[in-house]
Image (spheres, rainbow, N blue to C red):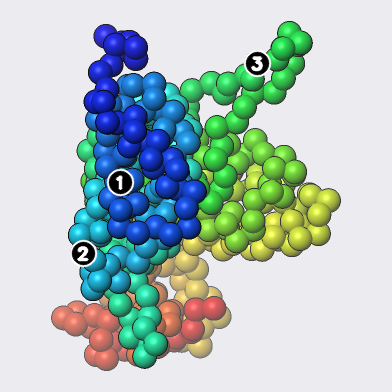
Amino acid sequence: MAVDPSQVQQPPDARQVWEDVRALLHDHEHGQVVYQTTANAIKLANTHFQHPEAKIFLVKCLHPAVNIMLDQQAARLDQENFQLKIFIENALTDAVIIIQKDLAEGNTQHIKTLAQLFNPRRNFYKGFKTKSFHQVPGNMKARSDCILIFCRANGFLALVSAFSQPQLVPPNPSGNSSEPPVSRWPGAEDVRYLITAMGEAYGDGQVLREVASRFADWVQAEIGEMGEEQLKAEPFVVMSALIRQLRRLNANLGNQSDDATFFNFWLDVTLTYIGASSLPMRLFGWEQLAEVIDEACGTRTPAKLCRVQGAGNSAVNGVYQLQPLESDSRDEDLRYTKLDDNTGLLLTLFQCTIQQTTSKWWFISEADINQPGTEKDIDYYNQALR
């Protein structure tokens, strides 16, 4: 049943707390009183989320409040003011729950705040180096807790559902309905932090495959619809990192081996960059094309047969058959064999990673029956993999 905001009860001091925080956020000196009061205001907004004044406070103050808290260095707070660290941690988890509730209503106005809550580079999460170059660890657990709480509240499902809704058409006083819809795209950098968090949650079993796959599909569709001007507005280094995150997520989802959707998206975007009028965009496109080709070569199905000819030892010549792979890992070395029916000689054409150098080599060998792949093999030929 829908809640009537006018009927939502509000504690008498909540309005004053929100007004105090609104004023305090404009100050430059942020002492413990500011943080404690701000954390309390966010908690009250979470408790009375449906109240109209709580939502007004959140629209105006949630993002700057979270930003100020994430600017603190948790490692220093451990040494100087542990209680302040607790206030900030509680405020961050309350903020995550608030954003989940807002997304469940189909709103995406706090997406940039959510992205910062998942941003591993914020001061509150990362460590710092002392003057003596000693590395002090950060508080990445606080970030992990935010992601976990968001997952348990089905936040990623709410996120995907909110993004998947039809784009809003802005009101036009003139009555002309030709206005373009308002995009829900928050920017490549924010999406990068969101997809990184989702990938981590999926890897930990906290997000369903369907949810992660839908989010990846939405991101790819949004980028695929961008024209030259929209792509130009996104920094190359951010787009490159975002594409890498999409590659990693698709690989973890198992989409790359049997689904060409990601590669088609990647190639289409790359060709858009290459065909742009801007020289820097074209150069970035050619860099991406080299990675597309490398990835395609690395993920293609291995040949089932290999023919060897022109060897000095004629027994080595012939057709070698691919042996079944033991896993789906792309790092597994390939192995082909050829059996001479007349002599019973079994030769193996295989890849081998040299442990001392981590480089790969091809060998044609007569493998030892008891200890194949060791110095007991009789090697006929070898060649470094280029």
Say whether residue 310 is visible: yes
Question: Of helix, strand and loop, which one carries label 1?
Answer: helix
The outermost residue toward the left is: 370
Q: Nearer the viewer, mark 1 or mark 2?
A: 1
Query: 80 or 127: nearer the eye?
Result: 80
The quadrant holding residue 352 is bottom left
Looking at the rendered structure, the number of numbered marks drawn on it comes to 3
Reply above or below: 221 against 133: above
Query: 179 or 231: nearer the eye?
Result: 179
Q: Tell me, for residue 82, which label it has, or none.
A: 2
In the image: residue 213, left or right of residue 308: left
Reading the chain from its start, which is encountered first: label 3 or label 1? 1
Reading the chain from its start, which is encountered first: label 1 or label 2? 1
Q: Residue 228 placed where, x, y %?
A: 74, 44
Is there a contact, CB below 8 Å, between mark 3 and mark 1? Answer: no
Reading the chain from its start, which is encountered first: label 2 or label 3? 2
Q: Which kind of residue does numbered mark 2 sit on?
A: Phe
Q: Which kind of residue does numbered mark 1 sit on?
A: Thr
Q: Residue 270 placed where, x, y %?
A: 67, 51
Give the quarter of the figure containing the C terminus.
bottom right
Query: 205 or 168: nearer the eye?
Result: 168
Query: 327 or 197: nearer the eye?
Result: 197
Query: Local crowd at mark 2 within 10 Å, few (<14), some, or many (≥20)?
Result: few
Q: Which kind of residue does numbered mark 3 sit on?
A: Pro
Q: Which residue position is annotated with label 1?
A: 37
Q: Nearer the viewer, mark 2 or mark 3?
A: 2
Question: Of helix, strand and loop, which one carries label 3?
Answer: loop
Reply above or below: 159 against 275: above
Q: Which residue position is annotated with label 3?
A: 171
**Label 2 to label 3: alpha-carbon separation:** 49 Å
In the image: residue 171, left or right of residue 163: right
